[in-house]
Image (cartoon, grey):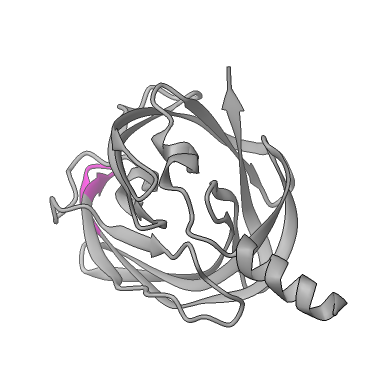
Amino acid sequence: MPFLILAAALSAAAGPVDCAGYYYFADGRRIETVTLDAQGSVKNRKLMTVRAGQVTPRSATAQLTTRSLDTREPATTSEARCENGDLLLDLTGSLPSQKEALSSRRPILLRYPGDMRVGDALESRVDFDLDGETRGKAMKVRFSLADRRVRASEAVDTPQGRKQAFVIRSTLNVSFRVIGVAIPMRYELVEFFVPGLGVMRTEAEEKGRTVERSTVRFLN
């Protein structure tokens, strides 16, 4: 009998995710992202401001404006959507600012299913270029994301208390091409995603070593 009660409780807890609960759709909310380098020193700080569109329990849209708190780089805008509890985030908002715009004017949306489970393979159709300039020379950056999977479940601290997060790991291949010379880089990305709240922590690993770690906090 206790097993049946537990199974019923787990079934009830696995209901649809409320789109309105994701922090990306709280109109006017300000979110600070702090990124640390491999030595634990602050690498950069960014402030994201939410401008929400129509928000319901089953769907939501928002425009996110992100600016650096450490440099005078121009602010970037990206978008977020929610469809039946699935979160879709525009990756272009987290890219470094360049002189030129993205070669594709369409948002690059990545889906975070609200009903994900450990072991799931997630879509990772992310393959795009960024044109820019470095030291007066034209530069093209190629991004490719692959092998995106839910590897584990882990409790993490959030602005709303301790929450259970899914640990999503993927491989990011980056190729910088300047004057015809390609410089490849490979990272293992780790994201800590709380269904109904959002991505609370990200890490980047290179050759098995964590080289970057980012956390978010909500500002008043």
Residue drawn at point x = 54 percent, y = 56 percent: 195
**Residue under the image location 61 percent in, 77 percent down:** 118
**Measured along the vertical axis of the image, is residue 144 above or below residue 18?**
below
Most distant residue in the top direction: 220
Taking the magenta stretch, the answer to whether it contains residue 133 is yes
User: Chief secondary structure of the magenta span?
Assistant: strand
Any magenta on residue 201?
A: no
Q: Which residue lies furthest to the front in this view?
A: 1
Q: Which residue lies furthest to the right in this view?
A: 2
Q: Can residue 211 be seen in this view?
A: yes
| Quadrant in the picture for residue 32 | top right
Quadrant for the N terminus, please. Answer: bottom right
Q: Nearer the viewer, residue 104 or 196?
A: 196
**What residue lies at 73% left-to-right and 51% top-to-bottom?**
156
Left or right, residue 108 beside residue 206? left
Image coordinates of residue 102 in percent, x first then y, are 19, 50
Q: Is residue 181 toward the left or the right of residue 35 in the image?
A: left
75 to 39, vertically: above or below: above
Count of labels shown? 0
Specify whether residue 205 is in view: no
Identify whether 106 is placed above or below 44.
below
Q: Is residue 84 left or right of residue 148?
A: left
Query: Which percent across, then down, holds residue 76?
Result: 30, 34
Which image quadrant for residue 68?
Answer: top left
Q: Which of 98 and 20 is in front in this view?
A: 20
Part of the protein shown in magenta: 132-140
At horizontal 57% and vertical 75% (from top left) the residue drawn is: 117
Where residue 71 sits: x, y (%)? 44, 25
Q: Quadrant of residue 28?
A: top left
**In the image, residue 130 lies at what x, y percent?**
23, 55
Residue nearer the viewer, 79 or 180: 79
| Quadrant holding the C terminus | top right
